[in-house]
Image (cartoon, rainbow, N blue to C red):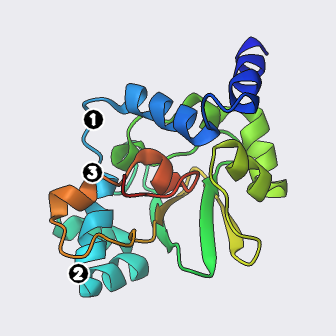
Amino acid sequence: ELFKALVKILTEKKLVELGEIRQMAERLVMAGQDLNGATLVSKAWLDDAFKERLLKDAASAAAELGIATSNPNAPTILTVQENTPQIHNLVVCTLCSCYPSGLLGIAPSWYKDREYRARAVRQPREVLHEFGTNIPDKKQIRVHDSTADHRYLVLPERPEGTEGWTDDELKSLVTRDTMVGVSIPTVD
């Protein structure tokens, strides 16, 4: 409650935006982690044929790069959902906190939070706004419910102005939160 009150004061006084708070928290938690999911996203942004394979059969496409998509303890299916100008995808696990940690790193505490899990399905646009992500009303939001057997990863839209960028430059734009769908990659 104290944290929420502090955030409310800071944002109302326009000292900081919600997206900046989310971004700072993610950077602290993810410092030094190499995200295999970011490798898949940047490759898909650079190679249309790979992107097509990734969307059709994520496990096979990832295996081409030596990346395993299944949970090491039990077999899981991974489906990649592509954000487009018409559709924004959001991932949640309504039952617990099923999450492709091999691709995204450690699951954030908010992903496991009962409030996020319940509200992401019923009020996705409002939840995204609370993360500092504003999706236009004309854009459809699709919520994907991960399970113990089936996990999801969002393929974000490639940001404008990144034509000619290298794989490493593109990879630097991809974060855990963009692959869950609570944020959008941007060029600073």
Q: Position of residue 159 (x, y in %)?
A: 39, 68
Q: Residue at x 79, y 51 (%)?
A: 126
SS class, disc 3: loop
SS class, disc 1: loop
Q: Is residue 89 visible?
A: yes
Closer mark to the observer between disc 3 and disc 2: 3
Q: Is residue 99 above or below residue 9?
A: below
- Earlier in the chain: of badge 3 and badge 2, it is 2
Q: Is residue 6 left or right of residue 87?
A: right
**What is the quadrant of the N terminus in the image?**
top right
Q: Quadrant of residue 22?
A: top right
Q: Amino acid at mark 3?
A: Ser
- Earlier in the chain: of badge 1 and badge 3, it is 1
Q: Residues within 10 Å of mark 1 (few under 14, many from 20)?
A: few
Q: Is residue 68 visible?
A: no
Q: Position of residue 92 (x, y in %)?
A: 65, 51
Q: CA distance from mark 2 to mark 1?
A: 24 Å
Q: Residue at x 71, y 43 (%)?
A: 130
- Earlier in the chain: of badge 2 and badge 1, it is 1
Q: Residue at x 35, y 50 (%)?
A: 103
Which residue, given by chain and number where applicable, does mark 2 sit on? 47
Q: CA distance from mark 1 to mark 3?
A: 12 Å
Which residue, given by chain and number where applicable, does mark 1 sit on? 33
Which residue, given by chain and number where applicable, does mark 3 sit on? 172
Closer mark to the observer between disc 1 and disc 3: 3
- Camera-side residue of 2 and 108: 2
- Camera-side residue of 96 and 120: 120
Q: Is residue 155 left or right of residue 122?
A: left
Q: Residue at x 74, y 48 (%)?
A: 127
Which label was assigned to residue 85? none
SS class, disc 2: loop
